[in-house]
Image (spheres, rainbow, N blue to C red):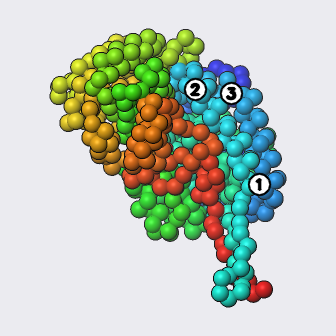
Amino acid sequence: MTYHDPKFDPLPTDLYIDGAFRPGADGTRFDVLNPATETIIASVASAEIADADAALDAAERAMADWAARTPRARSEVLRKAWELMTARLDDFAHLITLENGKARADAMGEATYAAEFFRWFAEEAVRADGLITQAPASGARILVQHKPAGLAVLVTPWNYPAAMGTRKIAPALAAGCGVVIKPASETPLTMLALMPLLEEAGVPPGLVNVLPSRRSGALVDHMLHDPRVRVVSFTGSTGVGRKLLKSAADQVLKPAMELGGNAPLLVFEDADLDVAVEGTMLAKMRNLGEACTAANRIYVHRDVASAFTEKLTAAMSALKLGDGTDPTVDVGPLVNADTRDKVAQFVADAVAKGAKIECGGAVPEGTGYFYPPTVLSNVPETADCVHDEIFGPVAALQTFTEVEDVIRRANDTEYGLVAYVFSEDMKRALQVCERLDYGMVGLNRGLVSDPAAPFGGTKQSGLGREGGHEGMLEFMETQYISAAW
Ligand code: NAD
């Protein structure tokens, strides 16, 4: 064990059920690795079916009281959770870096973003809307209100070990629901470490349960067939999302699916190139490219392609690669060897098909799952990275000349999460944004994630929205009462 941080001492490594840490029913455990050093950070309990049943029992009991509390009472607990997490951003950032690898600045960004969901949904908890109106013909009154939907199963990925969890837990609690969360097996520690803070904030025992597991498929499938569960909220790959949707169909659960992306980034000839490069760096390199929002295909107008490529290559080459716990490092390791090898394969494939490496492009020797910031120019449409998520620090550049052509190419994907547009001609830029078939568009900005905004995609990037006003509705049912007046 290499984890030494007195702030999380002891570091929780057991399942969190009914307000207490405990080993799994069958005693099995699995190792969590530090991707920079390839050493074991901790051995974590692995949940089995009996643990899932215990967690759902606890969530059901806790929810009965929680859902009956006033919105203000729920709001105050969430607000306190934000305060407590905000006071410990450093500690969370450190733990995120240890288990995920991302550099310090990325980890601090994530911890801040993660905490912010508690504040945002503390504010939303007291703003649930409803309606009383007169029925047009009968004279009866139509009363519409939102109620907690029921127990929610939450499943989260490894790329944002804190934020993908809080983005679901905070709205679920604001709505009045109890939850069981299954964090990714690569990064379960951050979510476990958050639980004592939630307890201190006043979250009652059992309302939030955390079940790391090596048997994700069987465990989640079991929970989705428990009649008490009404919501499944998933963030991860489109392939696993499809499986969960099929499982969810058996009980007709309310699904929220935040799935994969293949974000196009368009740089027009009238763009401010410094703004475009800064935005591209953010869209590509935030979380070292391990983000569903990462710019995957970068289309640059031919007139500015060489100037843009030069500036972007200079910015990418200036980044320092290394262990993310070193505060001078900009880019940490990828999460595991498979992810690193997949990124290397995307680059090899693009180069074999005619792309040119402007910088990076080779796996460094030594320990850790590192891949350097890489720029590829002249990437052909046939390259695999044009069609699949790279999920790594590789900027793949193509050129265009006609607006119609670049809109067609940008929309030519089964995904529809986010697109980016850089142009100083606002009229044209807004027209282009509207024609992009994406749930979100960054206009002269490389960052769209904001707790106050509805995050989510079209097509096979998912169903539903997280954050904003919409995020809480994913955990609520609408009830209408027709009242004789
Ligand atoms: P993944 O789909 O492999 O895993 C996500 C979660 O699902 C993990 O907790 C995993 O253990 C669990 N899981 C895996 N198989 C399962 C099964 N059969 N049944 C139930 N649960 C199962 O995804 P990942 O590799 O952890 O994350 C990367 C993917 O997540 C990328 O495609 C990325 O675009 C996507 N992502 C999307 C968003 C978004 O908001 N749209 C955000 C972050 C990541």
Tell me the quarter of the image containing the N terminus: top right
Q: Nearer the viewer, mark 3 or mark 1?
A: 1
Ligand 1 is within 8 Å of the C-beta of the residue at disc 1: no
Tell me the quarter of the image containing the C terminus: bottom right
The structure residue drawn at horizontal position 73% and vertical position 73%, both measured from the top left corner, is 132
The residue under label 2 is 107
Nearest to the observer: residue 450 or residue 267 = 267
The structure residue drawn at horizontal position 58% and vertical position 26%, both measured from the top left corner, is 107
Ligand 1 is within 8 Å of the C-beta of the residue at disc 2: no
Label 1 neighbour load within 10 Å: few <14, some 14-19, many 20+? some
The residue under label 3 is 89
Which of disc 1 and disc 2 is earlier in sequence? Answer: 2
The residue under label 1 is 126
For badge 3, the amino acid type reads: Leu
409 vs 13, left or right, is: left
When asked about the image quadrant of residue 242, the answer is bottom left
